[in-house]
Image (cartoon, grey):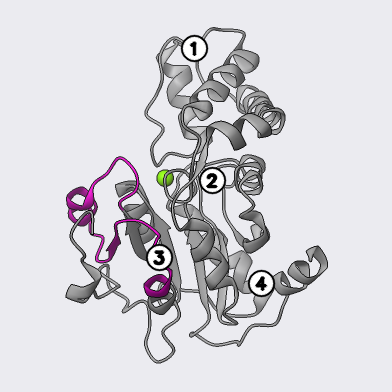
Amino acid sequence: MAIHLQHRRTRNVPKDHQTRLILWDIDHTLIETRGLGSQLYRRAFEVATGRTLEKEADVTGQTEPAILTATLRLHGIESSDLYQERYAQALAKEYDEHQDELRQRGRLLPGAREALAALSTHSRVIQSVLSGNLRAVSKTKLSVFNLDQYIDFAVGAYGDDDVHRPNLVAIAQRRASQKYGVPFTRANTVVIGDSTHDVSTGHEGGAAVIAVASGRDDETKLRQAGAALIWLDLTDTERITATLTVQNGQCGSGTDNVIEISPADRDPRGS
Ligand SMILES: [Mg+2]
């Protein structure tokens, strides 16, 4: 099985614009750590600085280095490469050591595995991650919930790659273009995430965006942020697959509102 999946990841894909790079956000889009993330962040901060975490910075939509810089500032400490390095090592270690707890306490969001699995069967789809999480933490989070088999981590972009999240889009596109020999632009790259930051990251960084209202930001906020297509969750596998694998259309038009939605895509909440 592992060999088969490894083969799939390095497969040849059709080298044209119909091949799509789908970049998933992790927290509140695919999984939730349900408080464990905050606990491990607290421990990593203490290991990195020798100080007790007294105040927490806003973490939503931020990269890990940006979160640490803001947190250090709240404690009157200037960020440095040494702190960043120590923190990154400590956080990766915490996640590595708490995999069982994450499995028990955290949760896979409804439909996430089915969506990734269904998309992974399409020859023109490459799935990876665009996350403020560190690369090592991204891998741990997704492997704990058995989602790693659908993700090509080599072509994703992570908090370790750039402190400014929108810059991650071009990094992922470059990696995917180099590996698969397909040019990835706004027209064939889709960022899928739960926060208004994901929406602005995609638009600013150069990708289409699909928002999922499974996090703190509701449909109204996501729409105000410019999301043209919003899913309430990931449970409608058929629609998700149909939207992301249209054969005779583009997922991006080159403008900010890159995905057109039909009324059928706008199910009322709770349906
Ligand atoms: Mg998120």
Q: Amino acid at mark 4?
A: Gln
Q: Amino acid at mark 3?
A: Gly
Q: With respect to residue 42, does 242 lie above or below?
A: below
Measured in 3D between alpha carbons, the distance from the residue under mark 2 to the one under mark 1, in whole angstroms, is 24 Å
Q: With respect to residue 247, does 178 lie above or below?
A: above
Measured in 3D between alpha carbons, the distance from the residue under mark 2 to the one under mark 4, in whole angstroms, is 19 Å
Residue 53: which numbered mark, if any?
1
Q: Is residue 264 left or right of residue 36?
A: left
Residue at the spot 46% in from the left edge and 31% down from the top edge: 34
The image quadrant where one finds ligand 1 is: top left
Q: With respect to residue 18, does 3 lie above or below?
A: above
> What segment carries the magenta color?
213-240
Residue marked by disc 2: 162
Q: Amino acid at mark 1?
A: Leu
Residue marked by disc 3: 206
Residue marked by disc 4: 178
Could you say where residue 90 lies in the image, as x and y percent from the top left? 67, 25
Outermost residue toward the right in this view:
3
Secondary structure beneath label 2:
loop
Could you say where residue 217 lies in the image, as x and y percent from the top left? 27, 44
Q: Marks 4 and 3: CB-CB under 8 Å?
A: no
Could you say where residue 264 lies in the image, as x and y percent from the top left? 21, 74
